[in-house]
Image (spheres, helix red, strand yellow):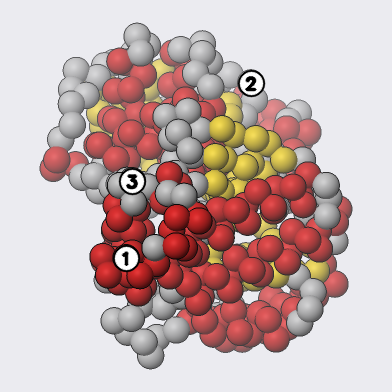
Amino acid sequence: MISTNLKQDILCGKYDKVFSSLYPDLEKAKQRYIDAVTEFENIYGENREVRLFSAPGRTEIGGNHTDHQHGCVIAGAVNLDVIAVVSENGTNNICIKSKGYDEDVISLDDLEVNQKEYGKASALIRGTVASFVKKGCEVKGFDAYTTSDVLKGSGMSSSAAFEVLVGTIVNAMYFGGKESAVSIAKMAQYAENVYFGKPCGLMDQTASSVGGFIAIDFNDPSVPVVEKIDFDLKENGYCLCIVDVGGDHADLTDDYADITVEMKNVARVFGKEFLRDVSIPEFYKNIAKAREAAGDRGVLRAMHFFADNERVGLEKKALLNKDTNTFLKYVNESGNSSDSLLQNLYSSKAPKNQPISLALAIAKSILKDDGACRVHGGGFAGTIQAFVPLSLADEFGTEMSKVFGQNSCHFLSIRSAGGIEVLA
């Protein structure tokens, strides 16, 4: 649709039903898309045929540091997303201008890995597009303007949302929508691993691409088993809150890496590469041997994996049965295990800095015996996750904001759609 006409149609409410299905605040969403189209026009020209795309951030709900050991997780797409206004440009270049960043220009003649691009958005674009080309997709040049309200450093995976967005654009515009949501997630992960230079699992991309509440079994990461779960938090009397407790992730790379390394060290004691393949009874019979090879913390972290991986199945069963109380019980158990066994609430290098531990203690004092809370994502800094009774939402937000800042609490909803063309 021509950009000027599209803005008018959005303003007049032609797409209200679509936007209402994606966003809790209809008028805010409409204005956001109108502003994005206007900015596209300012950068790339008016009266162009444009299309709209969206990919959501995600929240980890069950299974903390289980995915990289081929374990199970529960995750959910959230109502915060990256959106794009896109138009073919008749060239051999892909040009993407993201709000607040310089424009990335990718030549379709050069889709090879470039180590100089490690850590840059251009690498994510190049890697994702390269995967489609390898599958026989005839990608053409396009211009895109993107804007995101996915919180950075919040454990909502803004990078995964961006990768999935690019994949969704290419799939819809040049591949006839042939690729599944899981396939797009795999291509996005490949871009991040190989082109961006960041070793990551597949959970973030899958949650963003598929949408909704999903249970994922990574026993075979090349063919993850993905199951959608029909569950509405609000209908069951709760809301989801992510609390940004602050803290800098910059010096925590070793802390994150140590978890994977130590878990693998335990697995190798039993001749395996991943803990998922280790017999639990055999592990407990040989803790002394594992301790000698991997240290006390490695053994404790392995214990967390085995328990949390099993807990994901119990959480899934509770959600499918609409048994909210049992689900919340397991969320709390997972949080306690992350504290005592996984030990990812704070860095041992800076024991005086414990914002996650403090936030969880305050959250528990407010929630008492109702609701649940846990560390969110990788841990050590960043965010906690809380399932808050609707009756306590205002108090919870007020009290947490007193300690962690006015904009620290983010009440979210689970979005049923993953990566999509918005007006398809």
Judged from this view, the residue extending furthest toward the bottom is 352
Write the residue at 72% across / 40% down: 229
Write the residue at 78% across / 33% down: 17
Residue of label 1:
289
Among the two numbered marks 3 and 1 on one chain, the one whose residue lies closer to the N terminus: 3
Viewer-side residue, 126 vs 42: 126
Viewer-side residue, 20 vs 314: 314
Q: CA distance from mark 1 to mark 2?
A: 57 Å
Quick check: 99 left or right of 217?
left
Residue of label 3:
272
Q: Amino acid at mark 2?
A: Ala
Few, some or many residues within 10 Å of mark 3 (<14, 14–19, 20+): some
Residue 38 x/y as whole percent: 51, 37
Residue of label 2:
424
Judge whether 173 appears above or below 274 on screen.
Answer: above
The quadrant in which the N terminus is found is top right
Q: Secondary structure at mark 2?
A: loop
Judge whether 346 appears above or below 273 on screen.
Answer: below
Judge whether 364 appears above or below 88 on screen.
Answer: below
